[in-house]
Image: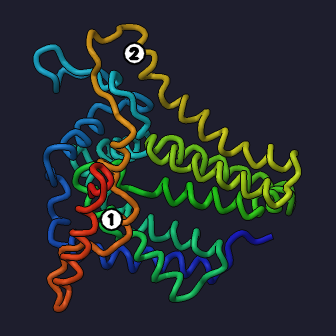
Amino acid sequence: MRYLSARTAWETLISAVVAFAVSLIVFGPILGLLNSGWAGSDMLSTYVNAEAWSGFSYAPTTHFGFPLGMNLNYFPGIDITENVFAQIVTNITGQPFVGVNLLVIISFPLVAALMYLVIRMTGLRGPLAIALAVTASLIPFHWGRALGHTYLATLYSAAIGLALVLLIGSGQFERLRNLGTKRQKIIFNSVISLMVITIAWTGVYFVAFTLLLGLAALIWRFAHRARLKELVVDAVPFIGVGVMAVIGFIPALLTLRADPPLLSLGERLPYESVTFAGNVAVALLPLPQSSLPLMGAYNNKIVEAISAAPWGEGTA
């Protein structure tokens, strides 16, 4: 049993290379500034997070939060894979900004490669699949959040979540887990486990995204007369995502329980999932700021349409 053909591997690589090449239009001029802060505000918080990261949780630090120091475990988050990557790069280079900046750059070819594999699961391949994968990695949301809400902008866990949902919703998960030799089954289960951990520990937003789509996938399987035993097995990866996400929150939960804060440190309301994450229309449509000929009318129409949406739903 072959999970990845030579053609699929090459087209995945091509997708990544093309996305990286296109991203250099923006990143090329600043590649020499990898060890500089690329933005303030929210991205400054990301730099601080990576600096204070200590393996699986944040270490209390007196480098920030004058005069008493700072313990970021009081603000729960499960952006573990991003912080681990940034910390490893920082430890290797000894430079504080390189890890986060490199993560932003790598996210473009990585998302293109992952999205090609997702698109390939639908049966599409060749130039069109490559073009769609590259386009998916270059959506305005990716650029718009990269120098702000960097954790949201990485998008690779969203692509992996889509792959998991498609795998289960299409019935391929049930088929593949029962095929091949014992070694191949171990490899397959290891890949699924890695997908589950990556989704769970790359931000709570995409955990929710995956679980909601996962519920839809299970309903789809039920509607297509999947047996109860199959549905239970199909649900295991999604249960795993939820369990691993809770495990990721344990350092924050222990900190809050051991020394509760005197006041609420922050909250997220439901409508903020749109306000801060953007809506689907804004994420997928070409950014309405083009200076190309004849694009003025397009810019105006899109801006007007988004502005006319109810408050909170028209926020990019």
Give the residue type that dot 2 points to.
Answer: Thr
Residue at 27% across, 55% down = 315
Q: Residue furthest bottom?
A: 293
- In this rendering, does residue 99 appear at all? no
Residue at 53% across, 42% down = 200
Q: Position of residue 65 (x, y in %)?
A: 16, 23
In the rendered image, the vertical position of residue 291 relative to residue 24, given as above or below: below
Residue 23, quarter of the rendered image: bottom left
Q: How far is the residue under mark 2 from the one under mark 1?
A: 37 Å
Residue at 37% across, 30% down = 54
**In the displayed structure, does residue 129 sit left or right of residue 150?**
right
Judged from the image, the secondary structure of the residue bearing numbered disc 2 is: helix
Q: Position of residue 280 (x, y in %)?
A: 40, 62
The numbered disc on residue 255 is 2
**In the displayed structure, does residue 64 sit left or right of residue 229?**
left
Q: Earlier in the sequence, mark 2 or mark 1?
A: 2
Q: Quadrant of the N terminus?
A: bottom right
- Answer few, some or many: residues within 10 Å of disc 1's Cα (few below 14, many 20 plus, some between 14 and 19): some
Judged from the image, the secondary structure of the residue bearing numbered disc 1 is: helix
Q: Residue furthest left?
A: 67
**In the displayed structure, does residue 315 sit left or right of residue 260?**
left
Front residue of 224/136: it is 224
Q: Which residue is mark 1?
A: 282
Give the residue type that dot 1 points to.
Answer: Val
**In the displayed structure, does residue 49 sit left or right of residue 217?**
left
Label 2 or label 1, whichever lies nearer to me, is 1
- In this rendering, does residue 218 appear at all? yes
